[in-house]
Image (tube, rainbow, N blue to C red):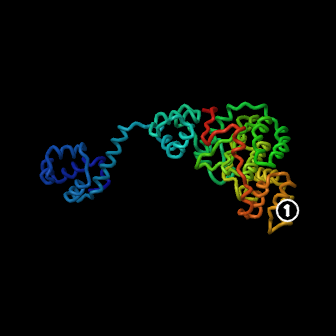
Amino acid sequence: MSEFEPFRTPGQLILSLMEERGWTRRTLGVVLDLSDATITRITSDKQPIDARLAIALEELFGVPAHRFLSLQKELDLAQARIVVQPDPTRAARALLFGDLPVSEMMERGWLKAENLRDKTAIERELMRFFGVNRLEDIKITSHGARKTDAESATTPAQIAWLRRVQAIAENMIVPKYSKDKLRSCLSTLKSGMISAEGSNKVSRILSECGVRFLIVETLKSAKIDGVCLWLDASSPVIALTTRYDRIDNFWFVLRHEIEHVLQCHGMDGAAIDADLEGEKAGTGHSIPDEERIANMAASEFCVPGAKMDAFIARKSPLFTEADLRGFSKIVGVHPGIVAGQLQHKTNRFHIFRQHLVKVRANVLPSAMVDGWGTVSPLGN
């Protein structure tokens, strides 16, 4: 028998084999020790072929058992396609529940659902959160956002965090944005760098320039440090996570994002800065142009490069506590900011760690905040 004969079901194949031998259903039933009714159901494809029956048929007719099983599988699939209705939301649901940190979003109060298994409630909340009317319209790929390292795609968790930032920022009221005011305020910001407490004025200063400034705790898998985005051509937003709660990191990331705003970066898609440490905080050739510009501005703002280089040249390899404090007074910043820059430039990350004080507790009281037990009333 040719394997190309047009049998679409195992029942058709068995009937053909019986016909070749001149067998009746009763004959086959006797040989297989099955009732006439069972043979009728098998040959009419109302009873499926299992592995044991396939082997028995192989012994009788010399047709490989997998041939019967293959036809059975194809029949089962064809019948299932008739019964199972297409569900355009199934793929979207798999993507959302598989990739988004839904449980953490619930814990943060971003999704107003109490039970992770309440699929209907969670899907409704996801549509509200992302501002769409259909589940399949939710975009958790790099739509409208980009990683500033230009090497990896924006993750769903980062997109969710960004959406939260946008929702809160859209409800913030600030004066009209002025690029000149933002540039002029840098000296005022600089004066606050002398102490950890000086960071509590950042929100007010940026707001007066028309910049929406907020602190949104990062999602665990997002590893975000900050973002620059624009609600429209005249509405810049700077959001930080203070993931590394250190004075040097806070001022570096803040000035980095301010430079993005001054250069109008992020207008073509929110620029998310993740893991803005080490090499990514540098100015080497592997760093994208926008990031190199922002990194250079941030580094110069923290400690002028020429002065830092001269300090290192004079004091290296031994840096004393007196050296650090004296130089910090000269450049007018907290010793922790100098320590952070010194560590970065010398790759000696163990020195002066005691000066890398925390600043989050100083920043949060005066800023728009979402996280650390606080759920912003805006954007809900």
* Residue annotated with mark 1: 311
Q: In front here: 215 or 333?
A: 333
Depth check: 257 or 148 in front? 257
In this rendering, position of residue 77 left or right of residue 359: left
Q: Is residue 88 visible?
A: no
- Residue at position x 85%, y 41% in the image: 184
Provide residue 314's location: percent of width, then percent of height: 86, 66
The image shows residue 120 at horizontal and vertical percentages of 46, 34
153 with respect to 312 (left or right): left
The answer to whether residue 102 is left or right of residue 71 is right
On the rendered image, what quadrant is the C terminus found in?
top right
Depth check: give the residue in front, 186 or 16: 186
In the figure, residue 368 lies in which quadrant?
A: top right
Residue at image coords 12%, 48%? 26
- Amino acid type at image mark 1: Phe
Q: Check the image and name the residue furthest to the front.
A: 322
Q: Position of residue 258 (x, y in %)?
A: 77, 44
Q: Which quadrant holds the N terminus?
A: bottom left
Asked where in the image residue 187 lies, by quadrant, the reply is top right
Is 75 above or below relative to 212?
below
Q: Please report the residue visible at 80 percent of the width from the left and 65 percent of the height from the top.
A: 319
**Secondary structure state at the residue bearing disc 1:** helix
User: In the picture shown, does residue 132 fall above or below 254?
Assistant: above
Q: Is residue 237 visible?
A: yes
Q: Position of residue 170 (x, y in %)?
A: 68, 33
Q: Residue at x 74, y 63 (%)?
A: 351
